[in-house]
Image (spheres, rainbow, N blue to C red):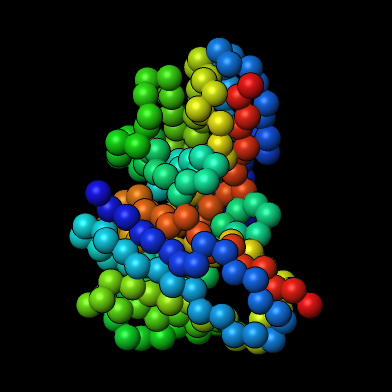
Amino acid sequence: EAGVTQFPSHSVIEKGQTVTLRCDPISGHDNLYWYRRVMGKEIKFLLHFVKESKQDESGMPNNRFLAERTGGTYSTLKVQPAELEDSGVYFCASSQEGGAADTQYFGPGTRLTVL
Amino acid sequence: EDKVVQSPLSLVVHEGDTVTLNCSYEVTNFRSLLWYKQEKKAPTFLFMLTSSGIEKKSGRLSSILDKKELFSILNITATQTGDSAVYLCAGGVSGNTPLVFGKGTRLSVIA
């Protein structure tokens, strides 16, 4: 079974530019989460989808961040315009609906560097 | 605010040593505690603990949860260089809700 995949692995952009990150969850997982790790800090929650609906977006830092999950499969996270403080590693995770729902499986992350 | 605190932040041991990693938590509506191992890329799932006092084991790794004192430990016996990684602890709130992570413990096992 394929795990959670993310694209790209690493992105370097200039301040003010736009970047779109993609996450493909494990097939059949309804729950999809975005997290971010800024250097020296903990991994922090950004957003939770259940299928195509945003269940919880309380962790989104501001309106420069837009997440979508059209069709309830893969998800994208767009940062526009990017700022220096957006640099970090963006992780995606997915989990099933049901008894083992708390077990979130993580992707390898996308390292975003904003210069 | 919910928080998870791990200690130590970093640890260097020799092959064959036994290590204990600590995780304390304050998570509203706490349901489960999860341990992950992160080497180069994706954090990989190790354990999920929901009941107090019941040890979970997987090879040389074991973990236990104390819901009264709000902490968990992860033990690794007879460490190997392949155990070198960042070990992450996370608290899960009830239902399908986001995880609250600690900063992680960076374990380095030297030959």
Q: Residue A57, image x and y in percent?
A: 32, 35
Q: Is residue A40 above or below residue A63?
A: below
Q: Is residue B52 left or right of residue B61?
A: left
Q: Is residue A9 above or below residue B28?
A: above
Q: Residue B104, image x and y in percent?
A: 50, 59
Q: Which of the pair A102/A80 is nearer the observer?
A: A80
Q: Is residue B59 left or right of residue B34?
A: right
The quadrant of the rendering that contains the N terminus of chain A is bottom right
| Residue farthest right in this picture | B111
Q: Residue at x 65, y 71 (%)?
A: B12
Q: Residue at x 58, y 49 (%)?
A: A107
Q: Residue A11, image x and y in percent?
A: 67, 29
The quadrant of the rendering that contains the C terminus of chain A is top right
Q: Is residue A96 visible?
A: no
Q: Is residue B35 above or below residue B19?
A: above
Looking at the rendered structure, the number of numbered marks drawn on it comes to 0
**Which of the 4 image quadrants contains residue B92?**
bottom left
**Which of the 4 image quadrants contains residue A14?**
top right
Q: Residue at x 52, y 20 (%)?
A: A83
Q: Is residue B40 left or right of residue B92?
A: right
Q: Residue at x 37, y 41 (%)?
A: A48
Q: Residue B37, image x and y in percent?
A: 57, 64
